[in-house]
Image (tube, grey):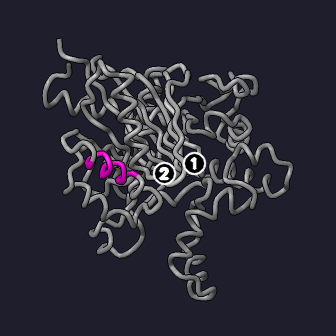
């Protein structure tokens, strides 16, 4: 009897990589373990846990032995040792930007990797981090299938005017358009919403992915028809260290009058702005909510104000609002933020039930609310595993 097959999913962030190992024998992938490759600490570490959260493996790199290649070698060795009854069939990667070419998952080859590398200027904070594991794993196991799943793919079908910038058309013809991101999260949450409240599939819904990165998706019939991020993951909502929507004249001023080099402007917008820039304290919403500093409250207020403002903008695209879904680290865990956004949207008929919100129940709207409100945890890793399993099944049956 052939060994059951598994897919390793890598979800790369700016300083850490979440991973999950999934059994793909069943119709829907089953999580075998999850973990974190944390390269941010002085001593990079690997932690692997069971689906229930029990620690299965932990290792910390010290001294000169901190190369990220060793961390990936540790992951592959851990899988081979603890899940030896499974055959690792593929590695699935979250890749932030797929550009105009990729509307769905694709096998990562050197040619595909080179095309994705060309998109780095559109996602300088994310694209290199997403592609680095592909190269490392290819060097270790060159015959192992690797698959890219794109954050832009879920938005790939939306069209003008939502996709268009008001700049000369020749630039649009070169691919300068609004792409949108967080698509793997939005895809998962849209699917869960269809299971939890199927009547909302055809209704006017906004999903709010609120975290260190944050964006909104206007959803109808399970499809994205508008979103707040654009050509890059910099636009839209206030984020942990990213500014979100900003007057382009500010950038011209910084360059022309402050004589700020382009690299410094990029660092300012991606790494020094957002919650961190406004508060001067932290990019972490948990720290700001716990702080008594006025600047922390200023950052929280701006975050909530912008989120409500742009939810109303998505409602304009939809022609109204029937449902609002909170997801992401802040969206799932910060009841105070959900409440603040709900208060700003009371004019739309949204009423948040304080008890349900405090407990982060799945449904948090009040009985007299004209807009349904949900809290749905996201699962980008499972979405990637599903895409990988579908691709592999299309080639040959999975053992």
Query: In this orientation, which residue lies closer to the viewer: 13 or 103?
Result: 13
Residue 283 x/y as whole percent? 67, 53
Report crowding for label 2: few under 14, some 14 to 19, many 20 or more residues within 10 A (C-alpha).
some
Please identify the quarter of the rendering in which residue 85 is found: top left
Where does the C terminus fall, quadrant-wise? top left
Under circle 2, the secondary element is loop
Q: Main secondary structure of the magenta part?
A: helix
Position above or below: 365 against 318 = above
Position above or below: 331 against 96 = above
2 and 1 marks in contact (CB < 8 Å): yes
Asked whether residue 314 appears in the rendered view, the answer is no
Residue 265 x/y as whole percent? 55, 74
The answer to whether residue 174 is magenta is no
Q: Residue at x 26, y 18 (%)?
A: 4
Q: How many marks?
A: 2
Q: Is residue 167 left or right of residue 247?
A: left
Report crowding for label 1: few under 14, some 14 to 19, many 20 or more residues within 10 A (C-alpha).
some
Query: In this orientation, which residue lies closer to the viewer: 286 or 174?
Result: 286
Residue under label 1: 43
Q: Residue at x 42, y 29 (%)?
A: 201
Labelled disc at residue 114? none
Please identify the quarter of the rendering in which residue 264 is found: bottom right
Q: Residue at x 35, y 43 (%)?
A: 93
Q: Which residues are magenta?
A: 130-139
Where does the N terminus fall, quadrant-wise? top left
- As drawn, which residue projects farthest toward the top? 1
Residue 5 x/y as whole percent? 26, 23
Between the residue at mark 2 and the residue at mark 1, the CA separation in whole angstroms equals 7 Å
Q: Residue at x 46, y 32 (%)?
A: 379
Position above or below: 83 against 330 = above
Please identify the quarter of the rendering in which residue 143 is found: top left
């Amino acid at each position: 009897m052939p060994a059951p097959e598994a897919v390793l999913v890598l979800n790369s962030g700016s300083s850490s990589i979440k991973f999950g190992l999934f059994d793909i024998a069943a119709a829907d992938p089953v999580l075998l373990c999850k973990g974190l490759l944390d390269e941010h600490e002085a001593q990079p570490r690997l932690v692997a846990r069971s689906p229930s959260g029990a620690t299965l493996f932990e290792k910390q790199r010290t001294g000169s032995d901190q190369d990220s290649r060793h961390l990936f070698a540790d992951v592959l060795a851990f899988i081979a040792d603890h899940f030896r009854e499974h055959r690792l069939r593929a590695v699935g990667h979250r890749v932030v930007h797929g550009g105009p070419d990729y509307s769905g998952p694709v096998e990562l080859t050197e040619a595909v990797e080179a095309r994705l590398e060309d998109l780095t200027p559109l996602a300088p904070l994310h694209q290199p981090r997403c592609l680095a594991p592909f190269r490392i794993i290819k060097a270790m196991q060159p015959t192992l299938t690797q698959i890219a799943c794109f954050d832009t793919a879920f938005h790939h079908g939306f069209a003008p005017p939502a996709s268009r910038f008001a700049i000369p058309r020749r630039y649009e013809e070169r691919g300068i358009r609004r792409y949108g991101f967080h698509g793997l999260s939005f895809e998962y949450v849209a699917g869960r919403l269809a299971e939890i409240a199927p009547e909302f599939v055809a209704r006017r819904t906004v999903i709010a992915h609120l975290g260190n990165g944050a964006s909104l998706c206007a959803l109808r019939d399970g499809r994205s028809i508008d979103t707040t991020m654009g050509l890059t993951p910099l636009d839209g909502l206030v984020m942990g260290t990213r500014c979100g929507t900003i007057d382009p004249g500010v950038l011209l001023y910084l360059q022309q009058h402050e004589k700020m080099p382009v690299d410094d402007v990029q660092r300012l917008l991606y790494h020094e702005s957002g919650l961190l820039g406004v508060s001067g304290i932290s990019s972490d919403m948990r720290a700001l909510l716990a702080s008594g500093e006025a600047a922390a409250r200023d950052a929280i207020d701006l975050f909530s104000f912008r989120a409500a403002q742009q939810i109303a903008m998505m409602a304009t695209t939809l022609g109204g609002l029937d449902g609002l879904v909170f997801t992401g680290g802040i969206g799932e865990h910060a009841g105070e933020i959900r409440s603040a956004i709900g208060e700003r949207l009371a004019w739309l008929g949204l009423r948040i039930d304080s008890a349900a919100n405090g407990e982060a129940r799945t449904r948090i709207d009040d009985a007299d609310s004209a807009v349904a409100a949900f809290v749905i945890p996201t699962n980008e890793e499972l979405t990637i595993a599903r895409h990988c399993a579908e691709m592999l099944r299309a080639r040959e049956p999975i053992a």
